[in-house]
């Protein structure tokens, strides 16, 4: 089944390291379409990296398991995370599936992978950064040169602005775009 990367492109002004603040506990939400009947689910679905749901017919587990409301076909999605062997005693669900969006000066307009997900029986639709994180979850980043941490980053119509006291300059993230890309 396809592995798709959720990619981000944005104009970063004085900040780097964009990532969901809650790490492994940050759920993402996006609309999905059933690949069998092509019906789009009426509500966005929530994908929880810490979730571990049994699939029907004993085929293992996934972070999200659901049935299509139209054709009743089972669909699932799972984050692709680094192998736990790289961190001593780490278990699945304890390693964040999210990669920091830390563009270098000459690649700020490029697409950067936030996470990779394996989809079975469904295709994700494009999401918006304003509604990507579930519940009260926020984004975090840090000052490009000062290292000042910025928590509680909330996007309003794809933009966020603040002031970096250490650097003495305005910072922000604008023109945020998201896409799913096959990897």
Image: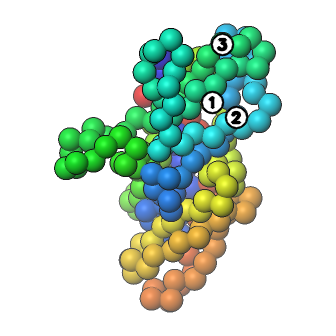
Residue 2 in the image: x percent, y percent? 48, 21
| Residue behind mark 1 | 124
SS at mark 1 in the image: strand
Q: Left or right: 140 with respect to 60?
A: right
Q: Is residue 38 above or below residue 62?
A: above
Q: Left or right: 125 with respect to 69?
A: left
Q: Residue 43's quadrant in the figure?
A: top right
SS at mark 2 in the image: loop
Q: Are marks 2 and 1 in contact (CB under 8 Å)?
A: yes
Marks 2 and 1, the one that precedes in the sequence = 2
Q: Are marks 1 and 3 in contact (CB under 8 Å)?
A: no
Give the class, few, some or many, for how many residues have Cα within 10 Å of label 3's Cα (few <14, many ≥20).
some
Q: Is residue 36 above or below residue 170?
A: above
Marks 2 and 3, the one that precedes in the sequence = 2
Residue 28 in the image: x percent, y percent? 59, 45
| Residue behind mark 2 | 31
Give the class, few, some or many, for how many residues have Cα within 10 Å of label 2's Cα (few <14, many ≥20).
some
């Amino acid at each position: 089944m396809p592995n798709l990367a959720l990619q981000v492109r944005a104009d970063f002004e004085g900040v780097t390291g964009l990532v969901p603040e809650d790490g492994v506990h940050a759920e993402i939400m996006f609309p999905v379409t059933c690949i069998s009947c092509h019906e789009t689910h009426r509500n966005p679905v929530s994908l929880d990296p810490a979730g571990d749901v049994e699939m029907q017919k004993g085929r293992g587990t996934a972070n999200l398991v659901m049935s299509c409301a139209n054709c009743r076909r089972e669909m699932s999605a799972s984050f692709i995370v680094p192998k736990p062997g790289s961190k001593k005693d780490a278990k699945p669900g304890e390693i964040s599936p999210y990669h920091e969006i830390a563009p270098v000066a000459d690649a700020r307009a490029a697409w950067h992978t936030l996470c990779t997900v394996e989809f079975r029986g469904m295709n994700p639709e494009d999401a918006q950064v304003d509604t990507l994180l579930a519940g009260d979850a926020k984004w975090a980043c840090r000052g490009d040169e000062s290292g000042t941490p910025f928590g509680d980053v909330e996007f309003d119509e794809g933009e966020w602005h603040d002031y970096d006291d250490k650097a003495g300059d305005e910072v922000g993230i604008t023109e945020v775009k998201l896409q799913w890309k096959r990897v």
